[in-house]
């Protein structure tokens, strides 16, 4: 069974994309090469990462970090899992600032973990990215976009294009100098030209969407 390496050769991706797409290549040369993602080389726990993604949804980073810190204190662990979250009931979660919907999502996640439905890193290394999406999106509160962020920033899969992301769509609009953003379907078709490095193209599209003479820093992305 083939194994998928974590990460890819960003120099090769830069050379390929800058030659493959003239319009995108102009922006790439303007912005310069983007560095390799250090997280690709770091081990992580998919269940813990998904639990944190649930807790961070629709909150500022500061507010979410505060809530996560409270949960960690109550459960006595920095590892969010079936065994640790099982130490806390829903009332205690709410006291930490976790909404009812997020509590239900956490319970669903850890129940699936206990049944062996959440693949670990070793298993993910043998799975196609579409299989990983299919395995994780049934979890309450976990959508395709959240899994795509994991694929890009944690697993380093080279060919992921989050077509529903507004920043990606805005960047593509700017590259092609269009009056309106492309639809997800149009972006998927446009992105065929960027394979097999659609992840690296996406990193540029985010930067392009953020780029202006007034911009001081790029917008933080989930799991980035």
Image (cartoon, rainbow, N blue to C red):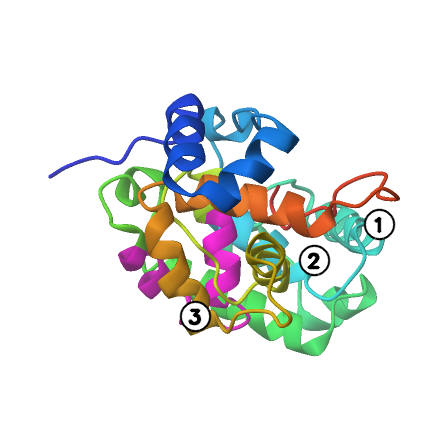
Q: Which residues are magenta?
A: 130-150
Relative to 131, 24 lies left or right: right
Q: For the residue carrying disc 1, how many other residues have a C-alpha within 10 Å: few (<14), some (14-19), or many (20+)? A: few
N-terminal label among 3 and 1: 1
N-terminal label among 2 and 1: 2
Residue lying farthest to the left in this orientation? 1
Instruction: Identify the residue under disc 3.
Output: 186
Q: CA distance from mark 3 to mark 2?
A: 30 Å
Q: Secondary structure at mark 3?
A: helix
Foreground residue, 77 or 119?
Answer: 119
Mark 3 or 2: the one toward you? 3
Q: CA distance from mark 3 to mark 1?
A: 35 Å
Q: Is residue 141 above or below residue 23?
A: below
Quadrant of the image containing the N terminus = top left
Tell whether position 45 is magenta: no
Instruction: Identify the residue under disc 1.
Output: 62
Q: Residue at x 62, y 48 (%)?
A: 206
Foreground residue, 174 or 63?
Answer: 174
Quadrant location of residue 14?
top left
Given contact means CB atoms under 8 Å apart, are the residues at marks 3 and 2 in contact?
A: no
Quadrant of the image containing the C terminus = top right
Q: Residue at x 30, y 58 (%)?
A: 130
Provide the major secondary structure of the magenta segment: helix
Q: Is residue 127 visible?
A: yes
N-terminal label among 3 and 2: 2
Given contact means CB atoms under 8 Å apart, are the residues at marks 3 and 1 in contact?
A: no
Q: Residue at x 78, y 48 (%)?
A: 65
Tell whether position 148 is magenta: yes
């Amino acid at each position: 069974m083939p194994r998928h390496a974590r990460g890819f050769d960003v120099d090769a991706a830069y050379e390929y994309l800058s030659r493959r797409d003239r319009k995108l290549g102009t922006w790439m040369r303007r912005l310069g090469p983007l560095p390799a993602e250090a997280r690709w080389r770091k081990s992580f726990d998919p269940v813990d990462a998904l639990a944190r993604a649930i807790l961070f949804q629709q909150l500022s980073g500061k507010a979410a970090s505060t809530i996560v810190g409270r949960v960690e204190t109550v459960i006595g662990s920095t590892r969010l899992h079936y065994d640790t979250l099982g130490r806390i009931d829903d009332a205690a979660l709410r006291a930490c600032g976790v909404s009812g919907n997020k509590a239900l999502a956490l319970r669903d996640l850890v129940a699936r973990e206990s049944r062996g439905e959440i693949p670990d890193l070793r298993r993910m290394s043998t799975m196609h990215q579409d299989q990983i999406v299919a395995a994780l999106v049934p979890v309450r509160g976990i959508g395709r976009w959240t899994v795509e962020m994991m694929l890009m920033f944690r697993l380093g899969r080279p060919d992921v294009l989050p077509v529903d992301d507004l920043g990606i769509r805005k960047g593509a609009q700017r590259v092609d100098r269009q009056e309106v953003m492309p639809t997800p379907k149009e972006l998927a078709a446009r992105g065929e030209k960027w394979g097999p490095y659609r992840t690296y193209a996406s990193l540029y599209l985010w930067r392009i969407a953020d780029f202006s003479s007034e911009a001081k820093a790029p917008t933080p992305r989930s799991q980035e």
